[in-house]
Amino acid sequence: MTAQNKALAVHLLTATGAVFAMLALLAAAQGEWSIMFIWLVVAFFVDGIDGPLARKYDVKSNAPRFDGVLLDLIIDYLTYVFIPAFALFKSGLLPGWTGWVAIILITFASAMYFADNRMKTTDNSFQGFPGCWNMLVLVMFALSPNFWIILGLVGILAVTMFLPLKFIHPVRTERWRSVSLPIALAWTFFAGWAAWVDFHPQSWAHWGLVLTSVYLISVGIVQQLIPARIRP
């Protein structure tokens, strides 16, 4: 296989995220939340591996007809923002006006964030919460907390999207990657298992989701507080 074909294959892999997004949306429209999240977890996994493959096969040079960054952003907005917001609204976790507030905050703030030229930091982390609403909503489905807690988390995270706080990319942020990447993979496993057992309240996967989520959402800020050692 030529370098051009390999690069094109990476674009095609990325584009499968749109198919998984549609399958997730169809499941959500029927209230089949577990199936919806399974498709979102599959899309999340694809999103985690297509970036390294794109850099390995240099898609910008070998398949320049397609803009991989734009393609990735389109799919990320669907799978990270739009469908999770829809699920949060339709699931009943946020009753009445609270659901409207949440979907307006999530979709509007995320649209602005995805267009922000300063969203990436020099160490390949994100400046501000990177709109990973799929992760938050999945954990909320698993734990089913009071709606005020959900609304409060949505409000806080929407604000932090535009604050100078760092959030890691588990694959691209090199600092502590040997810990962050396995934890991100563990989160993916726990998320898939929680959805597979239909978010059973006694599932052990819920504890794994909470612990891995706390790490992933806070480790970037911890790195800001603890400067990296300068190598001689």
Image: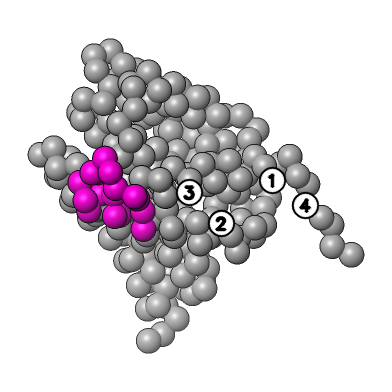
Quadrant of the rendered structure where residue 98 is? top left
Q: Position of residue 22 (x, y in %)?
A: 20, 49
Side of 110 where 43 appears, left or right: left
Q: Which label is found at residue 14? A: none
Q: Residue at x 67, y 42 (%)?
A: 222
Question: Which of the two discs, 1 and 2, labels the residue nearer the N terminus?
Answer: 2
Residue 178, relative to residue 120: is it above or below? Answer: below
The residues tagged by marks 3 and 2 sit, at their Cα atoms, a distance apart of 9 Å
The residues tagged by marks 2 and 4 sit, at their Cα atoms, a distance apart of 16 Å
**Image marks 2 and 4: residues in contact by CB distance under 8 Å:** no
**Image marks 1 and 4: residues in contact by CB distance under 8 Å:** yes
In depth, the one of 140 and 161 nearer the eye is 140
The residue that mark 2 highlights is 180
Q: Which label is found at residue 212? A: 3
Of all residues shown, which one is farthest toward the front?
Answer: 202
Q: How many marks?
A: 4
Amino acid at the residue labelled 2: Ser
The residues tagged by marks 1 and 4 sit, at their Cα atoms, a distance apart of 7 Å
Please indicate, yes or no, whether residue 29 appears anywhere in the rendered image: no
Of all residues shown, which one is farthest toward the top?
Answer: 97
> Which residues make up the magenta segment?
189-205
Question: Which of the two discs, 2 and 4, labels the residue nearer the N terminus?
Answer: 2
Q: Residues within 10 Å of mark 3 (few under 14, many from 20)?
A: many
Q: Secondary structure at mark 3?
A: helix
Q: Secondary structure at mark 2?
A: helix
The residue that mark 4 highlights is 228
Side of 89 where 184 appears, left or right: right
Residue 26, magenta (yes or no): no
Q: Position of residue 204 (x, y in %)?
A: 34, 50
Q: Residue at x 49, y 29 (%)?
A: 157
Question: Which of the two discs, 4 and 3, labels the residue nearer the N terminus?
Answer: 3
Q: Position of residue 123 (x, y in %)?
A: 67, 53
